[in-house]
Image: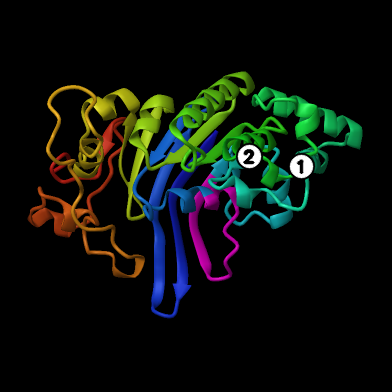
Amino acid sequence: MLEVRDLKVSFHTEQGPARAIDGVSFDVAEGEILGVVGESGSGKTVSLLAVMGLITDPNVVIEGSIKYQGRELVGLPAKEMRKLRGREIAMIFQDPMTALTPVYTIGWQIAEQIRAHNSISAKQAEQRAIDLLAEVNIANPHEAIHRYPHQLSGGMRQRAVIAMALSCNPSLLVADEPTTALDVTVQAQILDLVRKLQKNHKSAVVFITHDMGVIAEIADRVMVMYAGRIVERGNKVALFSNPLHPYTKALLDSIPLLEGERPRRLKSIPGSPPALLNRPKGCAFAPRCANRFEACASVPVLPNAGHDAACFKVNP
């Protein structure tokens, strides 16, 4: 359904070009859930915003190929992209309070998107909005459509954003950390909801998060990103049972254990992700890696072998 090849996203700055995405390639098959995981600043959101055509910065340069159902999206006119966005490809944004316009009711906002892509009456669009709010388990949807975003809790606003994203039955749904600002109970409900709706609507889902626990719960395949590159990818079971890249291992080691002896201190990854304008030569993770050696001065290649990692220890 989605084929991304050698995607590069750079921004012109006063200090020079800052490359946020550096040669990312991945596929999303029909009906699957691809989990994209990594620390803040790893390039997760920017790569999918490029797919959505939502990077409007005049200083951006996007290179490579993004094909949706065989159609090239890089260089597609804005008018054509708007026809796809919302109808064929939809996005659940991280912060529902900023994703929703505060001066309009949630029912009006959902109906507006429906009417933008379908030739139906205002009454039909309103009824569709009511049905969608009921589908995402919002109580009293007939009343809820007349509420403003500030009149809803965080979990309810996130459900409204999900309802809006699903309003035109998109084939591809991008979920950008939709559970980050929610408590654990509501987070579990949202994950169950996304999984249920994905099955009912038969949509492919790209689920962006920094939480390995969420990835373990919802994803079919996993793509681990660091400093704008993919460092490991593979089937969820294989990646969690046998992580190959030191960064993936470090992310998993930082999760508290549910069983066994309680450690005196949680493991952490030393250092910080590199700045875009000060990316280290060779492997970007090398300055933070305990296993680095001479070969890490070169950029490791990510093979295409199902479960693979961009690491010289794995692929000499």
Label 2 sits on residue: 157
Q: Which residue is mark 1?
A: 113
Q: Is residue 54 depicted above or below 205 in this figure?
A: below
Residue at (15, 41) in percent of width and height: 265
Q: Which residue is drawn at the image coordinates 28% and 57% (left, top)? A: 273
Foreground residue, 301 or 236? 236
Residue type (three-letter) at the residue carrying disc 2: Arg
Left or right position of 93 against 24: right
Magenta stretch, residue numbers: 49-66
> Is label 1 in a helix, a strand or a loop?
helix
Residue 88: image x %, image y %? Answer: 66, 37
The three-letter amino acid code for the residue at tag 1 is: Gln
x and y, in percent, of residue 102 in the image: 71, 52
Q: Residue at the spot x=53%, y=39% of the render?
A: 175
Answer with mark 1 or mark 2, whichever residue precedes in sequence: 1
Check the picture and name the quadrant holding the N terminus: top right
Tell me how the rendering is colored.
rainbow
Is residue 188 or residue 110 the one in the foreground? 188
